Amino acid sequence: DAMVIQNPRYQVTQFGKPVTLSCSQTLNHNVMYWYQQKSSQAPKLLFHYYDKDFNNEADTPDNFQSRRPNTSFCFLDIRSPGLGDAAMYLCATSGDQGGSTDTQYFGPGTRLTVL
Amino acid sequence: QKEVEQDPGPLSVPEGAIVSLNCTYSNSAFQYFMWYRQYSRKGPELLMYTYSSGNKEDGRFTAQVDKSSKYISLFIRDSQPSDSATYLCAMKNSGGYQKVTFGTGTKLQVIP
């Protein structure tokens, strides 16, 4: 089945210790997104890639970086995690051909704990 | 004022009830409307995708959009315990890839 896969599902890190979350997709979608979701809150868009073009949201802290080495994979790097970065991180993908193909499909998420 | 408002709940209903979930929005440019279901500690799953005003039905689910009132609804008929989840409304201005604005979600519990 075509899908969005995130690894790991649970990640524990220490305050200030860099961490990388990964996302892969078999949908062959042009666009990949990273969201941060805290408890009882809406997903907050951090950035997205349209093909290789990186688009950062204005309020995304510099602490968050991303890489997309190819169509299928995208990584979220948190350079120096703080306690406030503990959250669920969601990867999503979408096409760009209009209609329902441009709907965002989400992975299962990675729950990050910062000690 | 938030662009999208959604009552967080929780909403508790008995099994078999008709559930009504709603969102209001302020941006009249929104044209595409979605409902996602999110189980605890999982990613959102797309339930319904609609364009402009009107109704769309899929099995036990009906999505309704009233652009004149800036109001969207999701109805669930014959609710089941497996419907217990958080329901997020989402919307965007146009087709293609565009930033999606999400509501905060309504938590639904269907009691057997």
Image (cartoon, rainbow, N blue to C red):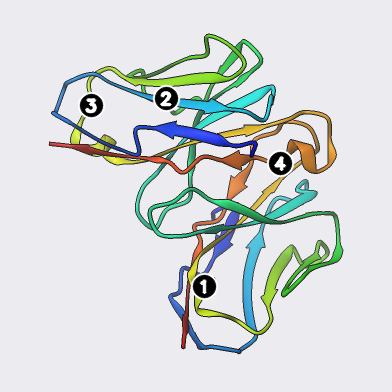
Mark 1: amino acid:
Ser
The chain to which mark 4 is attached is A
**Circle 2 SS class:** strand
**Circle 4 SS class:** loop
Mark 3 or 1: the one toward you: 1
> Badge 2 is on which residue?
A22
Mark 2: amino acid:
Ser
Task: Examine the image and state in which quarter residue B56 appears.
Answer: bottom right
Mark 3 vs mark 4: which is more N-terminal?
A: 3
Q: Residue B62: x percent and y percent? A: 76, 71
The N terminus of chain B sits in image quarter: bottom right
**Circle 3 SS class:** loop
Task: Examine the image and state in which quarter residue A11 appears.
Answer: top left
Q: Residues within 10 Å of mark 1 (few under 14, many from 20)?
A: few
- Residue B63, relative to residue B94: is it above or below? below
Q: Residue A83: x percent and y percent? A: 19, 36
Q: Residues within 10 Å of mark 2 (few under 14, many from 20)?
A: many
Q: Which mark is residue A81?
A: 3
- Name which residue lies at 70% across and 50% down: B27
Asked if residue B8 lies left or right of residue B37, the reply is left
